[in-house]
Amino acid sequence: MAVTETSQPLPDAPPAWLSILRMLWRDKFALCAAIFLLVVVFCAVFGPMLLDGIATKQNLRGRNAPPFDWSKAWVYWLGGDALGRPLLARMIVAAQNTMMVAAGAVVASMCIGTALGLIAGYTFRITSQVIMRLADVIMSFPSLLLAVIVLYMLSPSVGNLVVVLAITRIPIYLRTTRAEVLEVRERMFVQAAQVMGASTRRIVFRHILPIVFPTLVTIATLDFAFVMLAESSLSFLGIGIQPPEITWGLMVAQGRPYLTNAWWLSFMPGLAIILTTLSLNLLSNWMRTALDPVQRWRLEIARKSK
């Protein structure tokens, strides 16, 4: 009597984004960092629309009001500044300019640097050398010093600040992209695409760029923290964004004369900068493993063992 075997269908694999979310849930530090950054982004998007009037309203009776006075309105829970304006509301409103400058500079430098890196890594030697020498010229100047010189000659504004910081960060993405392209272009699937007659544009954007992109995203996350610190430093020096616009770095500078009797004016926005930078670094370390197919098995094994 013949025995018939019935094959059971294999369960469908979960979507990639769901697997990444599960790995993020297992890493509590990265999860807390992601939640904090989502809160910061929410404040940057909706804060000025909801609290702009409150953040600019002066109340001289509340000058340098101390923090953690729960009897007052919630916008005064972190204290008041030298003009009696609520510090918490001003920090929420200031998040928009801080995030706007950092995001604009990172996105612009990433797009330009990646495009130039793809050209330098997959074209003729002369073009590659010209692009790399241009990157060497930019890197020969300290980024913060170059920003100080340019902003001293130009009017300090959000647009000029984004352009200056983007220019100083282009070589990071350019050199990384070129190095990755030089390695990926020698792999068998790229050579097979060349043999089959695929165009250069198709090879670069369909086969090479998806391999390079996770590395660039990780670098952009780290670079976001660096650009935010650079913007805060320029605003602290007085050559960044000027009042009545406000950023966290400018708030630290405005509270400097009151450090002896109202330390919270500089401490609170400085703490926001520290926590945002720390969250970006924690999230970038997790993304470095999660977005790399070669290293992702470490998180998957940790998830299965638990």
Image: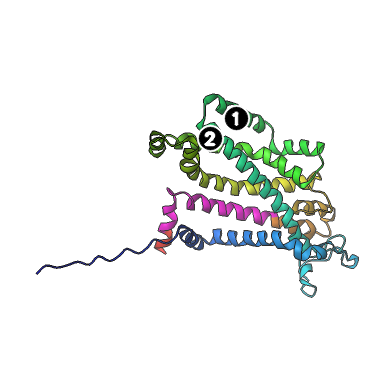
Looking at the image, residue 2 sits to the left or right of residue 40; the answer is left
- Foreground residue, 267 or 251? 251
Q: How is the image coloured?
A: rainbow
Quadrant assignment for the C terminus: bottom left
Mark 2: which secondary structure?
A: helix
Quadrant (top left, top right, bottom left, bottom right) of the N terminus: bottom left
Q: Residues within 10 Å of mark 2 (few under 14, many from 20)?
A: many
The type of residue carrying mark 1 is Ile
Pick whichever, 293 or 278, lies toward us.
293
Separation of marks 1 and 2 at Cα, in angstroms: 10 Å
Q: Residue at x 67, y 45 (%)?
A: 105
Query: Residue 296 vs residue 126: left or right?
Result: left
Mark 1–mark 2 contact, CB under 8 Å?
yes
> Percent x, y for residue 167?
68, 38
| Residue drawn at point x = 49 percent, y = 45 percent | 210
Q: Residue 196, position in %: x, y?
A: 38, 36
The residue identified by callout 1 is 131
Q: Position of residue 5 (x, y in %)?
A: 19, 66
Give the vertical position of 76 relative to 33 (above or below): below
Q: Main secondary structure of the magenta part?
A: helix
User: Which stretch did the figure color magenta?
Assistant: 273-301
Q: Residue furthest top?
A: 126
Identify the element where label 1 is drawn: helix
Q: Residue at x 68, y 47 (%)?
A: 104
Give the number of callouts.
2
* Vertical position of residue 1 compared to residue 271: above or below: below
Tell me the residue that label 2 is attached to: 178
Which residue type does callout 2 highlight? Arg
Task: Give how far across and how far down residue 182 sits, in percent.
Answer: 48, 34
Q: Is residue 297 magenta?
A: yes
Residue at image coords 63%, 29%: 134
